[in-house]
Image (cartoon, coloured by chain):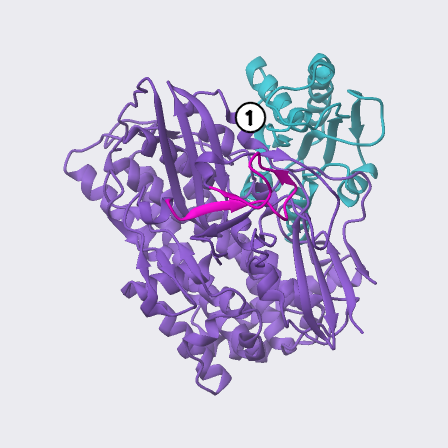
Amino acid sequence: MRIVILGIGNILLTDEGVGVRVVEALAARGGLPSGVELIDGGTCGMEMLEQLENLDALIVVDCVRCGRPPATPVLLKGDDVPVFFRTKLSPHQVSLSDVLASLEFTGRAPRKTVIVGMQPVSMGLGLDLSPEVAASLPELVDLTLAEIAECVALPEAA
Amino acid sequence: MSKRVTIDPVTRIEGHLRVDVEVDGGRVKKAWASGQMWRGVENILIGRDPRDAWAITQRICGVCTTVHAITSVRAVENALQLEIPVNAQYIRNMIILAHAIHDHIVHFYHLSALDWVDVVSALKADPDKTASLAQSLSNWNGNSKAEFKKVQDRLKGFVGTGQLGIFTNGYWGHPAMKLTPEVNLLAVSHYLQALEVQRYASKIVSVLGSKSPHVQNLAVGGVANPLATDAQSVLTIERLLAIKEWMAKLDDFVKNVYLIDVAAIGAFYADWTKVGRGITDYLCVPDIPLDGKGTQFALPGGFIAGGKLDSYQPIKSFGDKYFTDGVSEAIKHSWYDYKAGNDVSLHPYKGETTPNYTDFQDDGKYSWLKSPTFYGKPMQVGPLPRVLNMLAAGHEPTKKYATAALDLVSTIAGSKVGLDAMHSTIGRHAARAVSCAVQSDELSRQWDLLIANMGKGDLTTFNPPSFPKGEQMGVGFHEAPRGVLSHWVVIDSGKIKNYQCVVPTTWNAAPRNEKDQPGAYEACLLDNPVADPEKPLEVLRTVHSFDPCLACAVHVVDQENNPVVTVKAA
């Protein structure tokens, strides 16, 4: 079983970096099941190709703009995932969507992809999250942990 | 009658670039390049510890993380006049070179080849003929009939479902697409093989940089990799041997596939050697330092005026005044204000980052990019300026690969193609491939130098910095994949007082400067053909030939629910 939790976003732009902050919080917390890898993807693209190949599950954590109230956690699964990559909900899906499309074409796409995100309050310049998003961060970490637990329980690939 | 065409955003690049052109009689008459996002990283750095700047600046951009990190430590070391151990130079050099090779391969195959290669046409190719063509050009082991057949079948499956996936947004069937189905199939196959090969470059960067995708090993004063000939969990001989193996795989691909494909595609598009000349004042900085101070370099750099190699003026060392005195930035047409007014150009040490957004004004302000100049003139930077400067400096490996590439183009095209053809849209691709071959040789040499120095018993990688009271100023420069990158730092008693990044895409994608002279994109787009203003493929070809990367040139903000591509012809 190989599961990657990929935090993406630009930590220089306050809430834009919330995905990276979740990965940092999970790393500090420790105790993840074996086979679960944390990646701080920042705004990278093709460099991550190999780390994302043939996964049983990919959990992308990112700032997601979808018209919800500020600091609302968002979970996108199944048919909603392609929509996430098709419309400009996140400024980073351009390079990540290229990586995933390449994996698709070469037959190495993740068996399951889930997006865990949060509606941002601030996209301004700064290394710290907005107070609202910072206060909701534990909720986003819990949501990610729940998704990890669900993915770990998936049957192994044949 | 002239037609205004707006491409916003330009796709298959990093960041948000808008390009406007006025087309008359099938040719571009006027062009505007506009960075559509604001970058203010400089403002985040003020007041911070200079030792932390590299870790923050590497977050500016997802493509060039290592590039900004390296340049930042160089700037602080230059301010402190701190010499670093040669081992640290060799390790940094290997990271720089592996990253550059990665960048060049990915740019050609994954970001720009689709401007020239018609993916759908590859379905009509005869795999047999494709194999004999490919084998006549190169003995690469991925050029078998079975391989081409396999790729074609996979492509059929993909196109059959109506889902082009990674190949959506291409101008398939555009009249400017000229390759035969066989050449298209060859290129699509190499596109996929490049995806496999690029990972070796990423692995080199992640082993040397201790983490992927962001390096963790840099420090002001050297690198944080303890070297060892015996102990585990450091940079051991085993790990270095693994790197050597990956270097060989990359080298094989660069010399036997990339360089050859660029020459072949260039020969089939020979008319594009006459398009996209633009600015021929070429700036490049020397890189791959061979000593701790940065006074000797493996790859030379300097300035060439008007495309004439004999006008070459070398830049000789880190902090060479010829470079540092020459750079300034104007904002007459940029969405910023300077305290001293909009018609001045400021040296980066005195640089200001105060936004003043006005909307897009054709004759006023229209970009978030500033306009950098070198001794008052706009420059072109990137692989073409690099290759021409290295040729002018008499760098033998560059001469070898440039000659080989031009000879191959001449053979395929059936007519003599000389160095003058390089000042063009297709020439920028050729130069990037030549540069990549040179970088691959140099990567291997840096590995040898590191091992030889370790063999002498020198395992030092770090000289600790100390920050004196008072003010110090320093510049770090780096010949990054896209060209000249410089970071300028002013330190006051151990804290950052000012910080400016002058990035390659700012040089190339700059708006008009304080004297209303156009930037390199704008100049190179003049007279560019445009067959169909609704499908301005030819404009994209010229813009993509620079490998635009706006993420660090500008700030990252998108509007909600924008369509992915807007092409407006009015």
Q: Which chain is purple?
A: B
Residue at 51%, 26% (x, y): give it: B45
Q: Is residue B341 left or right of residue B318?
A: right
The verdict on residue A44 being magenta is no
Name the residue at 34% across, 38% down: B239
Extent of the magenta region: B325-346
What chain is the cyan one? Answer: A
Q: Residue at x 39, y 58 (%)?
A: B251
Residue placed at 50% from the left, 34% from the top?
A: B58
In this orientation, which residue lies closer to the viewer: B374 or B304? B374
The question of residue B334 being in magenta is answered with yes
Q: Is residue B33 visible?
A: yes
Label 1 element class: helix
Residue A17: name its quadrant. top right
* Image quarter in which the N terminus of chain B is found: bottom right
- Quarter of the rendering occupied by the C terminus of chain B: bottom right
User: Can residue B206 be seen at all in this image of the molecule?
Assistant: no
